[in-house]
Amino acid sequence: EAGVVQSPRYKIIEKKQPVAFWCNPISGHNTLYWYLQNLGQGPELLIRYENEEAVDDSQLPKDRFSAERLKGVDSTLKIQPAELGDSAVYLCASSYWQGNEQFFGPGTRLTVL
Amino acid sequence: DAKTTQPPSMDCAEGRAANLPCNHSTISGNEYVYWYRQIHSQGPQYIIHGLKNNETNEMASLIITEDRKSSTLILPHATLRDTAVYYCIVMTTDSWGKLQFGAGTQVVVTP
């Protein structure tokens, strides 16, 4: 069974540039999560989807971050414009439903210069 | 939300049992205890979870005290590949799926 796929694995951009991350969850998983992980800290939830509906986006900085999950499968997380403080690892996870164990992808390491 | 307290780091000898403690003194009756681990440069990995009974799977055992204020994750025979940060998380049924990670315990397994 294929795991959660994320791309790119690494991204280096200059501040004020836009950036997008893509996630393909495990087939059949209805719930998709995006997390942010700063160096030396645990992941923090940004947004959670049930199928194509964002059911918890309270931690998503909506002035510069946006996300979508069209057709309830793949998802994209976008930052525009990026700031120096956005340098972190962005993790995607999926689960069969919200109460099940979450399977995480390898993450995208973003560096903003 | 209930919070957890874990030691920042632990060492364990290869082949020995690793016992990872977690305090969650304010846990509520509808909150589960979850354990995840994160190997360097990888995403977190689910290990085990429980409500009040002890649980065991192929990876580990979870021992929850009778008053539910603390728990211990047991890796029965630690290997070098168990070196990781281990997170103890409590999750309420009111906010299913909302994992709130703390700093975790950095476990280093040595030969």
Image: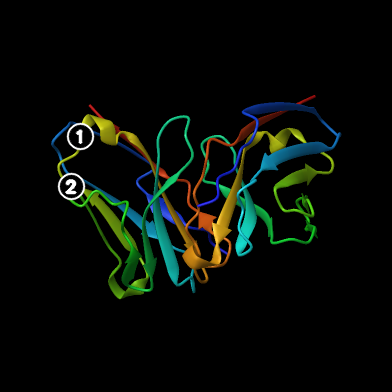
Q: Identify residue type, mark 1.
A: Glu
In front of the other: B6 or A50: B6
Residue B70 shows which numbered tag?
none
The quarter of the displayed image where residue A38 is located = top left
**Please, what secondary structure does the residue beneath circle 2 have?**
loop
Q: What element carries label 1?
A: loop
- Where is the N terminus of chain A found, in terms of image quarters? bottom right
Q: In this view, does A63 lie to the left or right of B28?
A: left
Count of labels in the image: 2
Does residue A4 appear to the left or right of B79 in the view shown?
A: left
Q: Label 2 is placed on what type of residue?
A: Arg
Of marks 2 and 1, which one's residue comes earlier in the chain? Answer: 2
In three-dimensional space, the C-alpha distance between marks 2 and 1, rounded to whole angstroms, equals 9 Å
Image x and y of residue B96, in percent: 50, 65
- Res. A83 mark: 1
Q: Is residue A67 above or below residue B18?
A: below
Q: Name the subunit of mark 1.
A: A
